[in-house]
Image (cartoon, grey):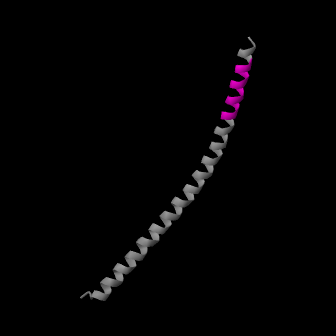
Amino acid sequence: MISCCEIALVLSVTNIVSLAVFAEYTIRLKAKQIKLEKKNGHEQDQINLLKQKIQQLEEKLQRYEWKK
């Protein structure tokens, strides 16, 4: 017959395994988040550069229209 200590041992092992799986999942999510934040930073730099170029072109257009 199975004693309560054996049941507690099995449940403890099961709990430890589930915590290990959760920890691995959390680590993978954190790594993916860091990768996406780095990519987002690069994309934000490109957006800012394009905004500057647009502003420069708008200024040139305004100067051209003002000279007419």
Locate residue 32 relative to residue 51 in the image: left or right: left
Q: Which residue is drawn at 66% across and 39% down?
A: 48
Answer above or below: position of 34 versus 45.
below
| Quadrant position of residue 30 | bottom right
Of 9 and 59, nearer the camera is: 59
Image position, residue 56 (x, y; %)? 72, 28
Farthest residue to the front: give it.
Answer: 66
**Most foreground residue, 12 or 59:** 59
Confirm whether the magenta stretch covers residue 10.
no
> Where, by quadrant of the figure, is residue 60 drawn?
top right
Q: Residue furthest top?
A: 68
Helix, strand or loop for the magenta stretch, by majority? helix
* Quarter of the rendering occupied by the C terminus: top right
Position of residue 39 relative to residue 53, above or below, is: below
Q: Tell me where residue 64 appears, x and y as whole percent.
A: 74, 17
Q: How many labels does the image show?
A: 0
Q: Which stretch is magenta?
A: 51-63
Q: Quadrant of the N terminus?
A: bottom left
In the image, what residue occupies the spot 45% across and 67% down? Answer: 22
Viewer-nearest residue: 2 or 45: 45
Decide: is 38 above or below 48. Answer: below
Q: Which residue is drawn at 41% across and 71% down?
A: 18
Residue 59 on the magenta segment: yes
- Furthest residue toward left: 1
Residue lying at 70% horizontally and 31% vertically, measured from the top left:
53
Quarter assignment of residue 17: bottom left
Front residue of this view, candidates 23 and 9 = 23
Q: In the image, 40: left or right of 18?
A: right
Residue 59, x across and y down, in percent? 71, 25
Note whether 50 is above or below 23 in the view shown. above
Residue 35 location (% of width, % of height): 59, 54
